Image: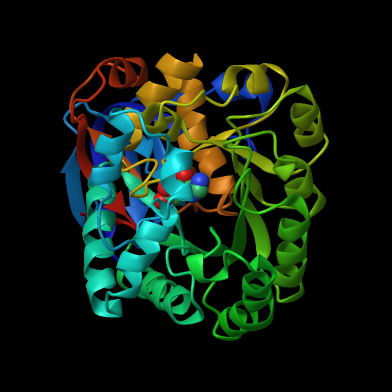
Amino acid sequence: MSSTLIRNIKTIYGIQTQPLPYKKGAAMSVVDTLSDAYILTEGEVIVSYGPMTSMPERADVVIDANYGLVMPAWCDSHTHIVYAQGREGEYVDRLKGVSYEEIARNGGGILNSAGKLQAKTEEELYLSALARLDEVIQYGTGALEIKSGYGLTTESEIKMLRVIRRLKESSTATIKATFLGAHAIPLKYKENRQAYIELVINEMIPLIAGEGLADYCDVFCDKGFYTVEETDKILKSASSYGLKAKIHANELAISGGVQIGVANQAISVDHLEAIGQEEIECLLASDTIPTVLPSCSFFLHIPDAPARKMIDAGLGIAIATDYNPGSSPSGNIPLLMALACNNMRLLPTEAFNGVTINGACAMELGESHGSIAPGKIANLIITKPISSLDYMVYAFGSGHIDKVMLKGKMR
Ligand code: NIG
Ligand code: FE
């Protein structure tokens, strides 16, 4: 097994000293650091870190960090990077005043993406998703969740999930797959939504679970999409096949999605732009991780999730890109952190924990990813020589990342 020594690190961020990785409330602003440091990796894992004064003498490969910062690679717990093409036409329509919901009601939005995706081959989808994956790895992402949901037929949902499986097998990034057949109601079923829900439950879920194609099941539980009752039925059926829940909830309205996600022991409930005190209390009494998506609010020009209020109430949030063609065509985590800080009033340390350890926990990867400790996967970012995490977030939009190591290999 080959060892790699990273030396001359100005500061390591995200050292994990506590056995409990998930950070809640006030702990979200705590990031453990070490300055003038080295990190040693062997094979796929971190072996040790420490001050330069006690640096090991030998390693197979030596990398000089040149007084850059080292951080754990980002953990993006909510993306939709398998899609056929962008929706920039809808973006321009929105700029002219048409709303996201109106576009969706008129057969655009998710249905537009589904039509385009159905016409593509698995190979075409694989190649375009791989290009997006390579792009986000360059921004420092080392683990991500990818959803289906632009297929909306049994054949095309399975096609999407097979693309995700190929990405899992071919990439050094760690990937979790989520089945999101209940993302919208296909036009064909507009007058008979029950029949589509039955297709999801009786055909898609058994086939997908049988082929081992998904880790989670998601439902878009929101106004104009799936009701609480429908969501509950789908999640219960998925759970009987071993697929845990991870849902889209409360983006467009107070939908009851948070409560139904929590009642179904969802790993995470995501979006939360429309939540109140009741939802916060429900989350506080659960193990479900609230996940906020600041670039979706930025891009759709909708209110941000009340992340500041949530953390102050004691919650631990994950922050994810939601990278998709309709509501967040960006997978750039450093930019996302700037949005989280500026628009949601989070501290850079809180944003950092949201996109590292808490993001890892929202994919059940907290034991292996999202922080720096001996035995954890060697997924590391080396920045250019900048002064601090605060500076990285403050000087938004610049490419601060110099190198990315995934599973012990430099990219
Ligand atoms: O997370 N809200 C639901 N689904 C995606 C966007 C879907 C789309 O517009 O293509 C989201 O924002
Ligand atoms: Fe999403």
Does 55 appear above or below 260? Answer: above
Q: Which residue is drawn at 37% across and 43% down?
A: 73
227 vs 134, left or right, is right
Residue 326 image offset from top left, x and y in percent:
37, 46
254 vs 204, left or right, is right
Colour convention of the picture:
rainbow
* Residue 260 in view in this figure: yes
Q: In which quarter of the image is the C terminus?
A: bottom left
Does 342 appear above or below 302? Answer: above
Q: Which residue is drawn at 48% across and 35% down?
A: 293
Q: Residue at x 35, y 36 (%)?
A: 333
88 vs 314, left or right, is left
Question: Relative to the observer, which residue lies in front, 210 or 154?
Answer: 154
- Quadrant of the rendered image containing residue 254: top right
Q: Quadrant of the N terminus?
A: bottom left
- Quadrant of the rendered image containing residue 9: top left
* Residue 32 in view in this figure: no
Q: Residue at x 25, y 58 (%)?
A: 85
Question: Relative to the observer, which residue lies in front, 371 or 299?
Answer: 299
Does 150 appear above or below 40? Answer: below
Question: Relative to the observer, which residue lies in front, 143 or 402?
Answer: 143
Residue 370 image offset from top left, x and y in percent:
48, 43
